[in-house]
Image (cartoon, coloured by chain):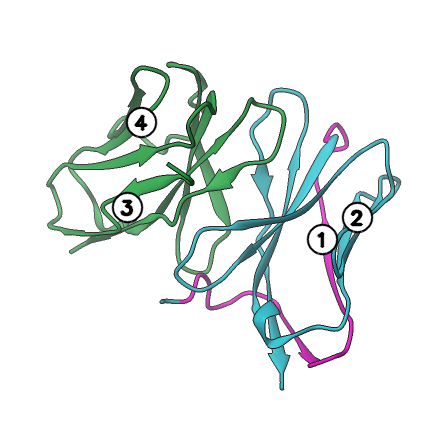
Chain colours: A green, B cyan
Amino acid sequence: GAGVSQSPSNKVTEKGKDVELRCDPISGHTALYWYRQSLGQGLEFLIYFQGNSAPDKSGLPSDRFSAERTGGSVSTLTIQRTQQEDSAVYLCASSRDHTGELFFGEGSRLTVL
Amino acid sequence: GESVGLHLPTLSVQEGDNSIINCAYSNSASDYFIWYKQESGKGPQFIIDIRSNMDKRQGQRVTVLLNKTVKHLSLQIAATQPGDSAVYFCAEKGGNTPLVFGKGTRLSVIA
């Protein structure tokens, strides 16, 4: 596609449920990033992929968070047993490689009730 | 869309005036810097970048200044327009580290 695509754009879930957020990066971009943005906060780094491997998972807040990337393209961020503090906008970005500009999607807004 | 942040520093400028948004970065090893613009309900959008071997770079109506001595970055917007109203983030990167974002500044343009 022309830009980074994320789905769903909005997700409301109950505390304790699992959620999956999807990111489709720009075609040909080898690096893919997940960030989280809470209300009143900046962007918090979660994880990045170079190809299908994740050299840096340092930002994942807990073991309830995991991510995978297959075929060097689509990535899924999974949050298990969601908590209210997980409510935020989850932003995905991709770049041609790990050295330059990041192109962001519109984000997936997660609300945990 | 909803606000991306309710308690951000805010800069209010008159339409047509120049805006200067400042950012202090933390890592002296950072060698790549980007300014992003984020409108309500949208993802961040690239404005301009600069590498550490430069101290100034100009784009269309925007200029980024880098002072490595005091670890300071600024974004200047000439002839600010209502469409410039948004939250602006600086971001820094060094080596293999991921892009680290600042807290953001809300620019409000008064028509």
Tell me the tag on residue B72. 2
Q: Position of residue B31 (x, y in %)?
A: 75, 30
Identify residue type, mark 2. His
Q: CA distance from mark 3 to mark 2?
A: 32 Å
* Residue found 70% across the figure and 73% down from its top: B80
The quadrant holding residue B63 is: bottom right
Q: Are marks 3 and 1 on the same chain?
A: no
Q: Position of residue A36 (x, y in %)?
A: 40, 43
Residue A86 as seen in the image, left or right of residue A3:
left
Q: Are marks 1 and 2 on the same chain?
A: yes
Mark 4 or mark 3, which has the lower sequence index? Answer: 4
Q: Marks 2 and 1: in contact by CB < 8 Å?
A: yes
Q: Position of residue A32 (x, y in %)?
A: 44, 27
Tell me the tag on residue A75. 4
Q: Position of residue A46 (x, y in %)?
A: 42, 33
Binning the other alpha carbons within 10 Å of mark 2 as few (below 14), some (14 to 19) or many (20 upward) gives: some
Q: Marks 1 and 3: in contact by CB < 8 Å?
A: no
Q: CA distance from mark 3 to mark 1?
A: 28 Å
- For the residue pair B62 and A35, the one nearer the viewer reads as B62
Residue B22 as seen in the image, left or right of residue B43:
right
SS of the residue under disc 3: helix
Q: Is residue B13 magenta?
A: yes
Mark 1 or mark 2, which has the lower sequence index? Answer: 1
Q: CA distance from mark 4 to mark 3?
A: 19 Å
Where B56 falls versus B17 (above or below)?
A: above
